[in-house]
């Protein structure tokens, strides 16, 4: 049996991403290299384009070193003369290319439109993507750990301990704005964890716009950030602390009330959320603020919408647990760390685009039923086989990765609960924050939401 592989010629042959090359084509990579002045001055065994694809492939294969990633890129190129660069040559090539091309490539690929607004205008065609004509998005942050080297410690710091000493690995704070329906990345920033989430959140405001609703947890309830987000004309839905005092300007029929945070008029909703499982009930009070002031929009519907914020947590889990496998970033310099994170974000986005495209014409399928794990392993297989690098005359819009996703769809989302506890604890003693919480698999649950009416009489008008 004969298999035909179509790739770039000469020393550019190892520069590919398997079938994902259709989403990140040669022309796109060449354009960002030219734009950032990163094209090689002379043709080498490791041209700049090939180095970029090597870094992206490393984002798909986080468990192995770059030399082994190179072996996988060349595994399907049987019969072609390809170089075998030494690790030092790969390191020098990474330094030569720098961070700028990866950042520019991420800027080209990021955005909700890649996975949300391809169906007509997308507003009614895709379940879970839009809510009352608004693109549902969420903002949140997470921490990645990088190699414990002197170079990395000049930029990234370790965590503290109760003994006053630093512990663990240097940490990188990553903040992202994500489309909840498809988990595509609209924008992302990262840097030292010495800067808090709110500091980085202001850098994401350039990607917020009218027609969005941004969901966020209590860490983002700062008055300055709320005012800045409202100025973008995007709506917001943010949880605030239950003890926060907010003036009552007008009580609405559903028990919510209008208030103000600085100059921003908001609607305040207090709800008791009860989760019932076979182990019993747990009730928690949620206090939410939103700029959706229309009294005809039920408070109960807004509280239910807030649950979609969890999609960004799932996205971070896919990035950190599925793609990285819980590993520390391999790079030993701050520049290398930045390269690696951009490569991870790009490969994550390309996989999310592939999943979204696979379900594009299936209006009955929620995009979040596409398995990220299935897509990741299918992409790795296509990378090793160097398959689908250059499209045939007849183009399969779904592709091999998409077909794998459609054949192994996740079940429709069920209401389940799994409290945050450490499953592999380093101590035999249960932390006080985890007492009373079960360990083990997710459990089926029933959720009940009760709106708590405000009892305070509003000021006379």
Image (cartoon, rainbow, N blue to C red):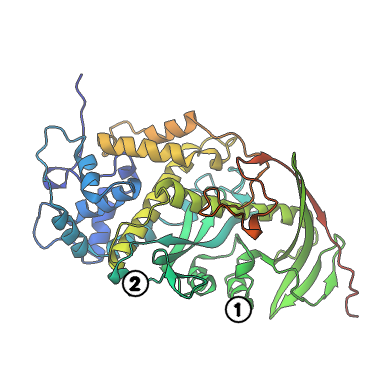
User: Is disc 1 placed on a helix, strand or loop?
Assistant: helix
The residue drawn where x is 72% and y is 74% is 265
Determine which of the numbered discs, if any, sits on residue 153 in the image: 2
Whether residue 313 sits left or right of residue 445 in the image: it is left
Whether residue 134 sits left or right of residue 21 in the image: it is right
Where residue 123 appears, as percent x and y from the top left, is 60, 49
The residue drawn where x is 25% and y is 54% is 52
User: Is disc 2 placed on a helix, strand or loop?
Assistant: helix
Where residue 445 appears, as percent x and y from the top left, is 72, 41
Name the quarter where the C terminus is drawn.
bottom right
In the foreground, 321 or 175: 321
Whether residue 314 sits left or right of residue 87 in the image: it is right
Q: Quadrant of residue 397?
A: top left
Q: Residues within 10 Å of mark 2 (few under 14, many from 20)?
A: some
Looking at the image, is mark 2 or mark 1 nearer the viewer?
Answer: 2
Task: Indicate which disc, 2 or 1, sits on the residue closer to the N terminus.
Answer: 2
The residue drawn where x is 48% and y is 28% is 407
Q: Quadrant of residue 413?
A: top right
Where residue 59 appears, as percent x and y from the top left, is 34, 50
In the foreground, 119 or 346: 346
Determine which of the numbered discs, if any, sits on residue 126 in the image: none
Q: Is residue 397 visible?
A: no
Where residue 458 appears, as percent x and y from the top left, is 88, 76
Whether 454 is drawn above or below 300: the answer is below
Whether 222 is drawn above or below 19: the answer is below
In the foreground, 228 or 376: 376
Whether 321 is drawn above or below 176: the answer is above
Residue labelled with disc 1: 224
Q: Quadrant of residue 233?
A: bottom right
């Amino acid at each position: 049996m004969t298999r035909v592989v179509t790739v770039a010629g000469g020393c550019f042959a190892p520069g590919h991403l398997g079938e994902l090359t259709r989403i990140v084509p040669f022309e796109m990579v060449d354009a960002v290299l030219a734009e950032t002045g990163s094209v090689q001055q002379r043709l080498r065994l490791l041209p700049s384009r090939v180095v970029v694809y090597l870094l992206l492939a490393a984002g798909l294969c986080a468990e192995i070193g770059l030399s082994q990633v190179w072996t996988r890129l060349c595994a399907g190129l049987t019969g072609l003369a390809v170089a075998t660069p030494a690790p030092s040559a790969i390191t020098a090539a990474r330094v030569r290319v720098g961070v700028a091309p990866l950042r520019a490539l991420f800027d080209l690929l990021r955005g909700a439109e890649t996975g949300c607004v391809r169906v007509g205008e997308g507003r009614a065609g895709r379940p879970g993507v839009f809510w009352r004509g608004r693109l549902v998005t969420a903002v949140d942050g997470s921490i990645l750990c990088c190699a414990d080297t002197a170079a990395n410690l000049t930029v990234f710091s370790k965590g503290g301990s109760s003994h006053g000493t630093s512990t663990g690995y240097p940490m990188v704070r990553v903040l992202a704005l994500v489309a909840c329906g498809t988990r595509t990345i609209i924008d992302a920033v990262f840097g030292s964890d010495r800067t808090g989430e709110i500091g980085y959140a202001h850098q994401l405001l350039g990607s917020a716009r009218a027609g969005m609703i941004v969901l966020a947890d209590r860490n983002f309830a700062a008055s300055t950030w709320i005012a800045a987000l409202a100025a973008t004309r995007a709506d917001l839905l943010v949880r605030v602390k239950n003890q926060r005092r907010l003036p009552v300007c007008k009580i609405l029929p559903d028990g919510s009330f209008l208030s103000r945070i600085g100059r921003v008029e908001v609607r305040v909703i207090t709800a008791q959320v009860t989760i019932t499982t076979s182990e019993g009930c747990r009730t928690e009070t949620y206090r939410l603020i939103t700029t959706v002031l229309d009294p005809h929009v039920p408070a109960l519907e807004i509280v239910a919408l807030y649950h979609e914020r969890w999609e960004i947590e799932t996205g971070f889990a896919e990035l950190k647990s599925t793609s990285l496998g819980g590993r520390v970033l391999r790079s030993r310099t701050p520049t290398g760390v930045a390269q690696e994170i951009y490569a991870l974000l790009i490969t994550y986005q390309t996989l999310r685009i592939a999943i979204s495209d696979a379900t594009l014409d299936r209006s009955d399928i929620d995009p979040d039923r596409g398995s990220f794990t299935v897509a990741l392993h299918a992409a790795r297989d296509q990378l090793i086989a160097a398959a689908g690098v250059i499209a045939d005359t007849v183009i399969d819009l779904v592709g091999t990765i998409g077909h794998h996703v459609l054949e192994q769809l996740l079940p429709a989302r069920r209401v389940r609960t799994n409290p945050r506890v450490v499953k592999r604890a380093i101590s035999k003693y249960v932390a006080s924050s985890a007492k009373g919480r079960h360990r083990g698999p997710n459990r089926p649950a029933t959720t009940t939401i009760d709106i708590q009416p405000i009892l305070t009489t509003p000021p006379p008008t």
